[in-house]
Image: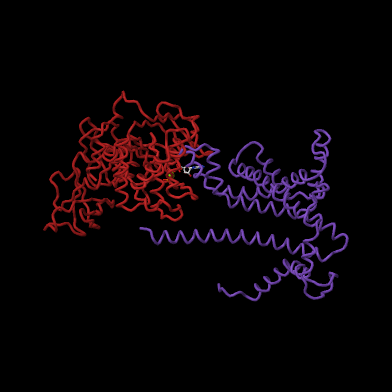
């Protein structure tokens, strides 16, 4: 997983290049259904060859955004450009996009093979070529042996693979995948993720992938856009999103996190000092955040960036919160500790199980100090 | 809850069936009556059937009925499918309520009035446009289309309202134009509803009398018209035989379509089970 995640960092970061031209420009797009705002003033640039993941809770407007790109919904206001062409008057069948539907939308009266071939036939592709391309894409999703079945004769995961194959087979310039892998088991999911990345590398297709699964977003994507109730709250590489979330929502949504409420005591360019009664310690962060002293902040610290010790640290009034071990979950390569701090707040700490059953192992009901390095916490203003 | 039927349920069932099918049972029985008098049972005989089939008037009327019913059902199905599609798909357009009301009005309009108004329309058209010159096949077929289309519309509207729109979107997305999408995706999927709409229109047209009387001319008389005129001259056992044949034809059609539908559904269930079993 780590190797895959590194991919995002090695890809040249076009989005940081001010001269680069975005392939897709979404400008202040809002979509209302009656009075309900499903997509709220979204602006987004996506570059050619990116694999952009849209991440967000149920009902936050991900599908609606994709449907506007595919042409099934018109924005209430705002503009969408694909390859510098205004999409307002372009019907779905003339857009350079293909979409994989969350509901799969397989044609029930056609076999798997006919479903996949449908798009190619609309382009009057020669029959020979249709056959080979359908065959190879069915091989890729491991559905060749079901080529002559109808959709209702397939399981959920099999249907999902057919839907994926049907959207991939035309190799469009822009692929919109709505929850493409949700119904697959772990092994098949990883294999398919790998294939999707392969296709992207090989054909330079631009992907927008909607997912609930943050690990999938981390693994697959060049960048992630996190959505919350119709708005894009943060856009960044998986690493940026994980390490530097810009709001409580993002910190909480991506991975697990311990959040402490507090207020700023000192804010210098080189460091911040935050008083957080909930943590039972002052929190010292080795970079400034430029805000007014006294301002309310939330401090987010990832469980794996915390450490546990039974001995009182030397510098014990900073970055060391005392508490009692209330639970230990053994997860194989790591253990998750649940610590009840003296303030009553519970925090999660993960520790890798490098040493097996060390002498000074931490046990239930032990009194411990939760510590962290000064560069680990992130201070959030909202 | 037990699966045993209580005596009340059985009684209700029996009474209901007698009420619905008693008259028909009598009619069918008396079509095998040897006695020429309707009311007296004179022993079993099938002699009325050959007599019936020798009657040229009956055969012509049957042919006319068949032509009128099949042609009008076909047009009604095309128009009703289009109307049902629009009503189910476009929830908001100018005059939707009016359109919806007008399309389905013939369902509740007294046939006497529908028939009369069609007649007046045809007379006016004949006067102003020179067509139709006389009442006949064309006018009776048009009249039948007008009211049987409403039934097809209702059937198709309810089918289209549960149709999964994303199937059409998927086809558009894959590059099919709207008309093509309708022909190769929508229509094949709703085909069973189209067929049952057609059958409905066909049977409604087949047994219509009132509207037919107003709008038909000489030479295209239908079976109900023939039966009606015969009955006025006194019931003749051949009528029973004719009615029995009609009942048989209609029942066969209905039962066949029912069997086809349930068999398809059963096969689908079996396939789903099989897919779940073999799923790996
Ligand atoms: N056609 C519609 N009419 C009215 N409301 C709609 C319509 N389509 C979507 N919505 C609403 O817009 C909101 C966003 O829907 P959307 O389908 O985009 O969510 P989503 O992010 O894809 O959620 P999920 O992860 O559950 O698929 C939802 O609250 C939904 O109820
Ligand atoms: Mg969705």
| Marker count (numbered) | 0
Left or right, A354 with respect to B185, comes to left
Colour used to depict chain A in the structure image: red
Q: Nearer the viewer, residue A30 or A146?
A: A146
Name the residue furthest left: A359
Across and down, in percent, residue B42 comes to 82, 75
Name the colour scheme: by chain
Left or right, A21 with respect to A323, comes to right
Left or right, B123 with respect to A152, comes to right
Q: Nearer the viewer, residue A104 or A278?
A: A104
Name the residue furthest right: B233
Name the image quarter holding the C terminus of chain A: top left
Name the residue furthest top: A19
Q: Quadrant of residue A272?
A: top left
Name the residue at 56% across, 61% down: B262
Ligand 2 quarter of the rendering: top left
Q: Nearer the viewer, residue B239 or B98?
A: B239
Q: In the picture shown, does residue A152 fall above or below A168?
A: below
Across and down, in percent, residue B40 comes to 84, 73
Across and down, in percent, residue B163 comes to 54, 48
Colour used to depict chain B in the structure image: purple
Across and down, in percent, residue B132 comes to 80, 39
Q: Nearer the viewer, residue B31 or A247?
A: B31
Q: In the picture shown, does residue B174 fall above or below B153?
A: above
């Amino acid at each position: 997983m780590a190797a895959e995640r590194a991919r995002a960092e090695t890809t040249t970061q076009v989005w940081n290049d001010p001269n680069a031209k975005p392939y897709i420009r979404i400008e202040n797009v809002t979509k209302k259904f009656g009075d309900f705002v499903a997509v709220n003033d979204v602006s987004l640039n996506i570059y050619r060859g990116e694999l952009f993941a849209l991440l967000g809770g149920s009902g936050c407007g991900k599908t609606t955004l994709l449907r506007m790109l595919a042409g099934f919904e018109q924005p209430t206001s705002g503009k969408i450009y694909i390859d510098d062409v205004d999409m307002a008057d372009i019907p779905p069948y003339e857009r350079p996009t293909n979409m994989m539907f969350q509901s799969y939308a397989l044609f029930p009266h056609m076999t798997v093979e006919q479903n996949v071939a449908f798009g190619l036939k609309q382009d009057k592709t020669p029959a020979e070529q249709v056959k080979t391309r359908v065959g190879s894409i069915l091989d890729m999703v491991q559905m060749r042996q079901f080529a002559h079945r109808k959709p209702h004769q397939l399981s959920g995961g099999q249907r999902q693979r057919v839907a994926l194959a049907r959207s991939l087979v035309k190799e469009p310039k822009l692929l919109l995948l709505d929850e493409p892998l949700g119904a697959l088991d772990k092994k098949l999911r990883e294999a398919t993720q790998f294939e999707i990345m392969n296709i992207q590398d090989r054909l330079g297709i631009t992907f927008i992938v909607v997912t609930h699964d943050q690990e999938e977003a981390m693994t697959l994507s060049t960048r992630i856009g996190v959505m919350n109730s119709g708005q894009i709250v943060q856009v960044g590489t998986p690493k940026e999103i994980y390490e530097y979330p810009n709001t409580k929502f993002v910190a909480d949504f991506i991975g697990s996190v311990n959040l402490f409420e507090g207020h700023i005591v000192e804010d210098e360019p080189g460091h911040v000092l935050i008083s957080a009664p909930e943590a039972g310690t002052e929190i010292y962060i080795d970079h400034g955040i430029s805000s007014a002293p006294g301002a309310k902040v939330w401090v987010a610290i990832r469980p794996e960036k915390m450490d546990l010790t039974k001995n009182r640290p030397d510098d014990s009034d900073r970055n060391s919160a005392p508490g009692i071990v209330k639970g230990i979950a053994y997860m194989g390569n790591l253990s998750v500790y649940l610590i009840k701090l003296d303030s009553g707040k519970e925090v999660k700490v993960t520790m890798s199980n490098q040493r097996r059953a060390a002498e000074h192992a931490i046990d239930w009901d032990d009194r411990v100090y939760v510590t962290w390095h000064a560069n680990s916490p992130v201070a959030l203003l909202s | 809850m037990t699966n045993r039927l209580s005596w009340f349920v059985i009684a209700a069932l029996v009474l209901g069936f007698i009420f619905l099918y008693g008259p028909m049972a009598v009619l069918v029985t008396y079509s095998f009556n040897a006695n020429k008098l309707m009311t007296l049972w004179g022993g079993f005989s099938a002699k009325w059937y050959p007599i019936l089939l020798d009657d040229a008037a009956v055969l012509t009327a049957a042919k006319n009925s068949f032509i009128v019913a099949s042609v009008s059902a076909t047009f009604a199905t095309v128009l009703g499918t289009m109307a049902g599609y629009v009503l189910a798909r476009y929830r908001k357009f100018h005059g939707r309520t009016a359109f919806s009301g007008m399309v389905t009005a013939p369902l509740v309009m007294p046939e006497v009035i529908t028939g009369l108004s069609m007649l007046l329309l045809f007379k006016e058209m004949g006067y102003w446009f020179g067509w139709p010159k006389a009442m006949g096949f064309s006018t009776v077929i048009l009249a039948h289309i007008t009211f049987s289309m409403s039934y097809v519309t209702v059937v198709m509207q309810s089918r289209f309202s549960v149709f999964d729109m994303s199937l059409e979107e998927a086809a558009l997305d894959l590059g099919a134009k709207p008309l093509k999408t309708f022909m190769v995706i929508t229509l094949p999927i709703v085909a069973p509803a189209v067929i049952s709409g057609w059958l409905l229109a066909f049977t409604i047209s087949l047994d219509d009398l009132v509207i037919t009387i107003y709008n038909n001319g000489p030479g295209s008389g239908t079976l109900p018209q023939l039966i009606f005129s015969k009955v006025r001259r006194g019931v003749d056992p051949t009528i029973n035989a004719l009615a029995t044949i009609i009942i048989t034809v209609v029942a066969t059609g209905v039962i066949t379509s029912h069997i086809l539908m349930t068999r398809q559904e059963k096969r689908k269930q079996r396939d789903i089970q099989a897919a779940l079993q073999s799923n790996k």
